[in-house]
Image (cartoon, grey):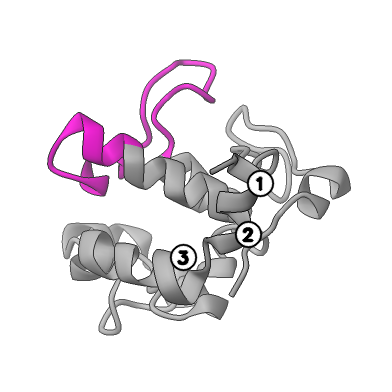
Amino acid sequence: MTSAALAADVSYRNDIRPLLKTQCGECHGDESPTLADFLQAKEKFKKEKQGPRFGTYAELLQLIGWPDSGALMRRLDDGSNSSNKKPGNMYKYLGETDALRTANLNLVKVWVGEEAWNLNRWENGDGIGAITKEQMDKLKLKY
């Protein structure tokens, strides 16, 4: 199957939601804070080992497109897209083995969009550039 054909088949409902619920639900599930609440008390929630909730499609899109552009990609990246070549702090939770982490990351990348995977923020910050309209236009994110 070509990556274009695979991309057409990968959806939030059938592939991404079950993956994230299994791999990330403990810290990002329904009991976790909204992104707005998380950003207001980040240190408190980090101590409680809770990240922003992304149990719904809309909540997850906040960590991809806006307002926290690229957050999901920065956290899940394997290091191949970062200047320091270090994996994101959540990459290790994508699976128990390197092979499973790689497969799960590739699934998320296909869903986001073959050319849309980038680590940029909404605005420049922390040495990371701002996302461009062209990059936003490449997002696939099939429901």
Q: Could you tell me which secondary element the residue under label 1 belongs to?
A: helix
Q: Nearest the camera: 24 or 99?
A: 99
Image quarter hosting the C terminus: bottom right
The answer to which of marks 2 and 3 sits earlier in the sequence is 2
On screen, residue 80 versus residue 28, left or right, reads right
Q: Which residue is mark 2?
A: 8
Q: Which residue is mark 1?
A: 4
Q: Residues within 10 Å of mark 3 (few under 14, many from 20)?
A: some
Q: Residue furthest top?
A: 84
Between circles 3 and 1, the one closer to the viewer is 1
On screen, residue 89 versus residue 77, left or right, reads left
Name the residue at 63% across, 54% down. 69
Q: Position of residue 8 (x, y in %)?
A: 63, 59
Q: Could you tell me which secondary element the residue under label 2 belongs to?
A: helix
Q: Could you tell me which secondary element the residue under label 3 belongs to?
A: helix
Q: Residues within 10 Å of mark 2 (few under 14, many from 20)?
A: some
Q: CA distance from mark 2 to mark 1?
A: 6 Å
Q: State whether residue 41 is above or below residue 69.
A: below
